[in-house]
Image (cartoon, rainbow, N blue to C red):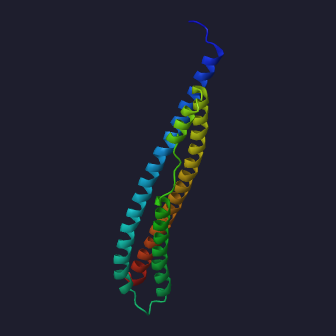
Amino acid sequence: MPPKDAETEVMERDKLVLDLVSERFKVEWDLGSELDGKASSLAGFVGIIISLQVGFGTILIDKIPKTNPYHVYLYLFYFLGIIFLICSILFAFRAYYLKEYSVAPNPEKLIEMAEKGESQNGIVRKISVDMKIATFNNEQVNNSKASNIIRGFIFLVLGIATMLMFAFSVIFSVGF
């Protein structure tokens, strides 16, 4: 194998860097779609849970006699559960809310570089930098989405736990 000259080696290195940055960019891009799917699923699931809780909760609240010394606490469990679930759905919507992703390379910038007679190595380096910046920005957007989904899930768990405490409290205090 003939030895490579320094310029060829630099070009191969820069192309390798561009390929690796491109792969990382694609990972962040795909992750954004996956997170949107999770946020959408969470919102749908919480919507169903809220509907069930309001329906069954109304039936159970009607069974609580006003003379029950714990009726205030039972109402508190009921409404607290609904509030937790509403917080969960709000975080899911916040995660799903459209955010601006960065896209690289910019076709107009590529054409300008070609028209200026930029070298192939120069173009590869500038695109690599642009993709690095776009990847970092997209990572920040995805981290924000993931954080909101996690918060939404925590509120979902709190809402379900509170709903179960309400249901069991009503059952044991009223004596079904």
Number of marks: 0
The x and y percentages for residue 75 are 46, 83
**Residue 106 visible from this viewpoint:** no
**Residue at 55% in and 37% down:** 112
The quarter of the picture where the N terminus appears is: top right
**Front in this rendered view, residue 36 or 62:** 36
Residue at the image position 50 percent from the left and 67 percent from the top: 158
Q: As rendered, which of 78 and 84 lies closer to the eye?
A: 84
Residue 103: give x, y in percent of width and height.
Answer: 51, 45
Q: Is residue 127 above or below residue 60?
A: above
Q: Residue 151: x, y in percent?
A: 53, 61
The residue that appears at 48% across and 74% down in the rendered structure is 83
Residue reaching furthest to the top: 1
**Residue 172 located left or right of residue 143:** left
Q: Residue 59 vs residue 98: left or right? A: left
State the residue lying farthest toward the right.
6
> Looking at the picture, does residue 16 appear above or below residue 66?
above
**Quadrant location, the C terminus:** bottom left
The picture quadrant where one finds residue 12 is top right
Residue at left 57%, top 36%? 127
